[in-house]
Amino acid sequence: MYLDYLIDKEMNRSGNMSRKKKYNLTLCDFNTDRKPTWCPGCGNYGIWKSLKKAFVNLNLEPHEILIVYGVGCSGNGANFIKTYAFHALHGRALPVATGAKLANHKLNVVIVGGDGDGAGIGLNHFIHTCRRNLNMTYLLHDNRIFGLTAGHASPTSARGLKTKSTPSGVLEEPLNPVLLALAAGASFVARGYAGDLLYLSEIIKKAIKHKGFSFIDILQPCITFNKQETYEFYRDKIYRLDEIQDYDVSDLNEAINRSLEKEKIPVGIFYKVDRPLYEDNLKQIERKPLVDHIITDIDINKLLNRYY
Amino acid sequence: MKVSNISWKIGGEAGDGIITAGLIFSKMFARKGYFVVDCNEYPSLIRGGHSSYTVRIGSSEIFSTSKDINILVALNEETVRIHQEEVLYGGYIICDDDSFDIADFKKERKDINYIAVPFSRIISELKVPEIGKNSISLGASAALLNYDIEVLKEVIADVFSEKSPEIVELNVKLSEFGYKYIKEKLKLSAYELEIVKPVNKILVTGNDAVFLGAVRAGCKFYAAYPMTPSSSILHSFASVENDFNIITRQAEDDIAVINMVLGASYAGVRAMAATSGGGFSLMNEGIGSAAMTETPIVIVLCQRPAPATGMPTWTEQGDLLFACHASHGEFPRVIMAPGDPEECFYLTGRAFNLADRYQIPVIIMLDKYLSENHFSYDRFDFKSITVNRGKLITSSSDINEEYNRYTDTDNGISPRTIPGVKGGVYIANSDEHDQYGYSDENSRNRKIMVDKRFKKMKKLIEEVPPPRIYGPHDAEITIWSWGSCKGPILEAMNILNQKEKKVNFIHFTYLYPFDSEIVSGIIKESNKNIIIENNKTSQLSKIIMMNTGYKIKNKILKYSGRQFLPEEIASGIEKIE
């Protein structure tokens, strides 16, 4: 695809290809033979490219990656990126990813889901996954609308947004995923923008490299159903956190303050801290992944003795 | 008096150490080769409320507890009030007549021997905690049965070993106190059990046996949300997570549980979860996800009286049809319902093989009665549980040029890779998909994939064993039942046989898939059929009718939250005649 070619060229120019490779990975290695079914102009295209680019930059091969998808327009992406994939139930991507990561902690696990999926029906898992700090990366495709059900209000929809299910406007305050992730104890919290894919790709790369649970709230225009939060809307409001002098990513209070901003919208890494990895505290997998343990003929003689 | 079996019951307030006392009593006999079945009943609260524990001991094989009690230990007045009527003619009640007046009770039952043991006085004289009454009563009970106090002391030491040496010493001392009080002060003895071959028997609940079977079968990931009566499986797994390298996790809810199990299984390990009806309700969608992605999972459903919160600490078989139809849509599955802990052990081993080989969800159904009550057995032959993972590809060298995860095969089972295997990349897709895993809503593909999944049923139905027949083939009466009713029914058959009634019993341990030809054959040959179930609507008879067209009219149903007693079943059958 032409866009892939452009991005590959871009990466060559920025010198990323000079890293040691298993072989010359390109974005095309992550393409499937299915063409994306998103609306032309959908923010998903930008995130899709950014993610593939991050994989190439990190020198990861398709079989070394597991992406667990939720249900929604973003979840349909399962068909368009070639890696191991589990297209889970609506809202249930995080626990599936958690189980898979615990079964094989050598896998690079990425979770893809929308705001309805992760901040609505699956919100409980979001909070608890932040608490756990497994080494995984969660990309919340936040278009502030239910796209795949054809335009219902989502938990991140702006107050007053009129949709088919809220003809008089949304009455609730929108949920703030960045603030929630910070409060729940995520060790890496960022926000990206689907309209700036190279910058987004850099954030994704850093998120995957981060040792711990990394969360990226990705602002994503839905050109079909959300006429409020458009590309123009974001273009005027967005600024980059790494352009703020002395911004300290280890300062939780500062991160919280920035996450509360409304007039201008910060993107970039809000918060990053080293916390003990969940999987590092499991003796069972100290020496090898759970999946590599041999299970034929397990001796339960001693265990039976307990029952006398 | 020499007897071949005996029933003992202890009752008091929840928090009086009733369950510990009952377990010690059971172990004390299992250790010396006796057949033991016990049954504990307690309310859903931590302190207060009435709680009881019944232990039946046999010198020959027994299958359940019974209605009649030989010795009742009453730690409070309420216990006498509630359980006095269960005491056999000429039986014994051990109680503390300092704490309450037993004169009125004596008037009601002149036949009973009331044995006054001053629990409270001993406790206050020795300045020990109130809960110590249970150990005094154990010593007194051992004395009444002319049983070796050394065995009791040994079991107390083992059971309390995790606490402290002081606690062990104190309880041993209290049990000796009770023993001597009966032997030396009152100079009493009531019964003596016939001698058995002194083999060391294990004492396990259904939950213990499921856990043991799963560990042997190589279950490496266990997730759960605590829910009575399934929680002891979680505790058991947690206690050996490092010894056997099993990741055991308590998740945020039951939805997370089943999805974690799915993720772990998808990534290549054997994974299981257990819950009760409420948690199982939440897991339903996940069961469908396992079916659609053809990911093997094993779910243990420990039933309790429902709907809603129901009666958390009591028993019922109300979820059978629910399990058979759990989750939306049509897909193959296996439903097992072991009848006792021994079957729990071996069936759990098979559950993992069936799940792996057919890439389907397998549901093992227990109920509170089976989950929490102990049975004694000779040591399980764990070597007979073997591991067969089916068409699992864990190395890229086993992959042919083009790998299609959901390729349509003769038996519907297609090779499954796991993440990390080069060349085996695929989508486990909860959307309907094509043979590669890509979402596909094409009408032709839909039919192919539904048929592919259902092709598994043909081989599965051949492999799943038919219901087991107990008793003579030419019986006048045929009893039909499933799961945990097995024990009380086998006991009831003994009662009826003594009355020279020819009865046999068809017991289902597999309820799905259902072999209608075999079952129709049995029904046709039977004279008189009776269904026995621990539920209101006779769900097994509905399954039989649905699959065979036969309607079994005679039913004995119980839905009080309590398991059947053999005597109830025997008299119920006599009434139907």
Image (tube, coloured by chain):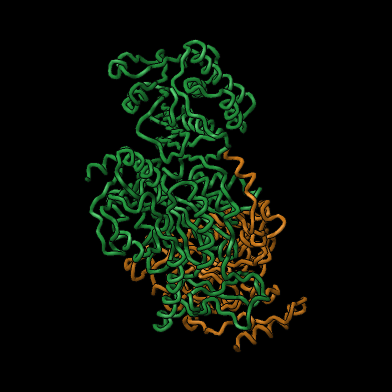
Q: Residue B167: where, in percent of width, then height? A: 60, 25
Residue shown at 63% from the left, 60% from the top: A188
Q: Residue B577: where, in percent of width, then height? A: 22, 45
Where does the C terminus of chain A fall, quadrant-wise? top right
Judge by depth and name the residue closer to the eye, B476 or B491.
Answer: B476
- Give the side of residue B519 with respect to residue B242, left or right: left
Q: Residue furthest bottom?
A: A2
Q: Residue B557: where, in percent of width, then height? A: 28, 46
Above or below B312: residue B463:
below
Judge by depth and name the residue closer to the eye, B461 or B542.
Answer: B461
Q: Quarter of the image holding residue B113?
A: top left
Above or below B158: residue B259:
below
- Give the orange chain's letter: A
Above or below B410: residue B546:
above
Identify the colour of chain B in the image: green
Q: Residue B75: where, in percent of width, then height? A: 42, 22
- Give the side of residue A120 with respect to residue A138, left or right: left
